[in-house]
Image (tube, helix red, strand yellow):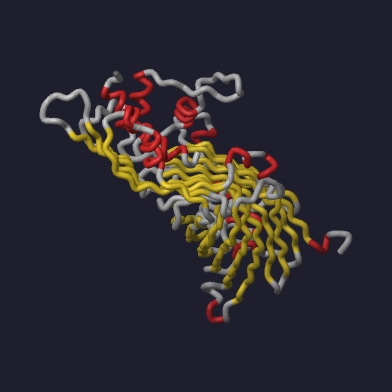
């Protein structure tokens, strides 16, 4: 007969596994990553396509085409696990089975105890984004028009409160409440059309809000897959202890959850599906971005202005096909052990499966910030400081409702540029970012790291976060066919 403690641990793992088995900030503003993503008032041209549609307008005085060549952003991180921890605990034991899959790592007691100290309410998140097409055309006296294709794969896992007790030898003598766990996966492409216009203020306002830009992006969304368990789900075990000794306990099991699944994530994880032209469509939707930018001062000798801006991004939803699945369970049962987990009881714990269309919100968020040129206080290098506050409004994909604050500094205005940023909050937590880029006439590059600690090779870093991009600027009057 199995030991009572083993029975309880198996039971709790089964309840949490039921939830998981039913399912399984933009990183394309490359300069922004090096500036702690504090660029809602600072980004321009194609960099602004994912940040603030009002800022696709530039200071070009003639018709100009700007486009970017496949910028890529990748992030893997955790609020509690270092990169070394993630690789060790979740990367397998380094061997591969006959089917070509990584074998899991089995933890020794000491390793388990260390893991236990980390898991409660810990978050693991990852994101991969590409922009196969990003183009902006500025027309003097008319505004700017942009078009973009963006592909995004986002994952967020938050361990429930008290989950450590499962690994810490929970014996079933006390109530156990697993709550607050969260699991989100979202894979989609968006096809966006952006328009921005500048509104010049009357003469009386020329020293304040000298000009105002407004912008709007309308996006068609193709959803490839989604999996979700929200934080309102709970799994509770309440023991009924006998007055005298008994070889078994009765446990009241209370399980409430709602899980949704659409598409096939494993089948969609192909490189070609990150071009915007591959993959199987499992859902469609419409989204919008709205933005505002206002100049607080007149341009200085280098064309820089103090400015204020805000944007509301990813307003909308995806409606998934009728073949998608929703699982609901609201079960209270009493069992004595795994022996009573018959197929009928397991089906009750799994809940009711319903195949029907449903809608999920896009990862909507609000951003507000400013940019301020500081002149050239250090070695005649012009410096611009900027700050950005981001508030997630929906928990979807990697999006979180934890507020985020970033402050960035750009060194230089022409030629080679240096960037550094300081961030707090969000999934990333406290951190320092950095990057380099260029501002030349035709071709420019940007390379950024969201975590300087990871860049320097510190195994204790919690964030692997990099992006790279190449941009072109073509004045139309210099093209031979115009």
- Between residues 346 and 405, which one lies in front from this camera angle? 346
Q: Which of the 4 image quarters holds residue 179? A: top left
List x then y, in percent, for residue 232.
36, 49
Q: Could you tell me which quadrant the N terminus lies in? A: top left
Answer above or below: position of 342 versus 369: above
List x then y, in percent, for residue 143.
68, 70
- Between residues 72 and 383, which one lies in front from this camera angle? 72
List x then y, in percent, for residue 14.
38, 33
- Between residues 161 and 457, which one lies in front from this camera angle? 161
The residue positioned 51% from the left and 33% from the top of the image is 454
Answer above or below: position of 407 versus 75: below
List x then y, in percent, for residue 313.
53, 60
Q: Could you tell me which quadrant the C terminus lies in? A: bottom right
The residue sitting at the right extreme is 481
Q: Would residue 283 be found to the left or right of residue 147 on screen?
A: left
Q: Which of the 4 image quarters holds residue 121? A: top left
The residue positioned 33% from the left and 43% from the top of the image is 255
Q: Is residue 455 visible?
A: yes
Q: Would residue 225 be found to the left or right of residue 244 on screen?
A: right
- Between residues 340 and 370, which one lies in front from this camera angle? 340
């Amino acid at each position: 007969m199995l030991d009572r403690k083993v029975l309880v641990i198996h039971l709790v793992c089964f309840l949490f596994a039921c939830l998981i088995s039913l399912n399984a900030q933009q990183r394309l503003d490359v300069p922004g990553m090096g500036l702690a993503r504090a660029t809602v008032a600072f980004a321009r041209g194609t960099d602004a396509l994912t940040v603030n549609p009002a800022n696709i307008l530039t200071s070009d005085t003639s018709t100009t085409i700007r486009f970017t060549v496949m910028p890529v952003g990748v992030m893997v991180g955790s609020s509690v696990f270092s990169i070394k921890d993630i690789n060790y605990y979740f990367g397998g034991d380094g061997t591969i089975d006959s089917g070509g899959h990584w074998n899991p790592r089995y933890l020794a007691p000491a390793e388990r105890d260390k893991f236990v100290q980390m898991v409660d309410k810990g978050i693991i998140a990852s994101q991969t984004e590409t922009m196969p097409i990003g183009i902006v055309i500025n027309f003097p006296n008319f505004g700017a028009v942009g078009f973009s294709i963006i592909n995004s794969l986002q994952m967020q896992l938050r361990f429930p409160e008290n989950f450590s007790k499962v690994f810490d030898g929970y014996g079933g003598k006390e109530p156990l409440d697993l709550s607050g766990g969260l699991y989100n996966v979202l894979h989609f492409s968006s096809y966006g059309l952006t328009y921005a216009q500048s509104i010049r203020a009357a003469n009386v306002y020329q020293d304040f809000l000298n000009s105002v830009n407004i912008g709007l992006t309308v996006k068609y969304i193709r959803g490839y897959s989604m999996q979700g368990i929200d934080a309102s789900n709970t799994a509770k075990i309440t023991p009924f202890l006998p007055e005298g000794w008994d070889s078994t306990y009765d446990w009241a099991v209370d399980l409430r959850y709602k899980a949704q699944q659409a598409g096939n994530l494993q089948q969609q994880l192909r490189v070609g599906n990150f071009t915007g032209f591959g993959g199987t469509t499992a859902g469609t939707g419409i989204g919008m971005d709205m933005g505002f930018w206002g100049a607080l001062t007149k341009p200085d000798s280098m064309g820089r202005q103090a400015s204020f801006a805000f944007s509301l991004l990813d307003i909308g939803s995806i409606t998934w096909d009728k073949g998608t699945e929703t699982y609901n369970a609201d079960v209270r049962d009493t069992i004595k052990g795994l022996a009573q987990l018959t197929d009928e009881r397991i089906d009750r714990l799994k809940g009711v499966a319903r195949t029907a269309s449903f809608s999920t919100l896009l990862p909507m968020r609000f951003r507000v910030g400013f940019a301020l040129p500081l002149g050239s206080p250090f070695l005649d290098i012009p410096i611009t400081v900027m700050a950005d506050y981001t508030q997630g409004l929906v928990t979807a994909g990697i999006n979180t409702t934890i507020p985020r604050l970033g402050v960035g500094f750009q060194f230089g205005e022409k030629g080679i540029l240096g960037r550094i940023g300081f961030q707090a909050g969000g999934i990333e937590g406290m951190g320092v970012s950095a990057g380099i880029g260029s501002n030349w006439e035709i071709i420019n590059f940007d390379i950024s790291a969201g975590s300087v600690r990871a860049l320097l090779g510190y195994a204790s870093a919690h964030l692997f976060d990099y992006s790279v991009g190449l941009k072109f600027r073509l004045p139309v009057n210099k093209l031979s066919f115009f």
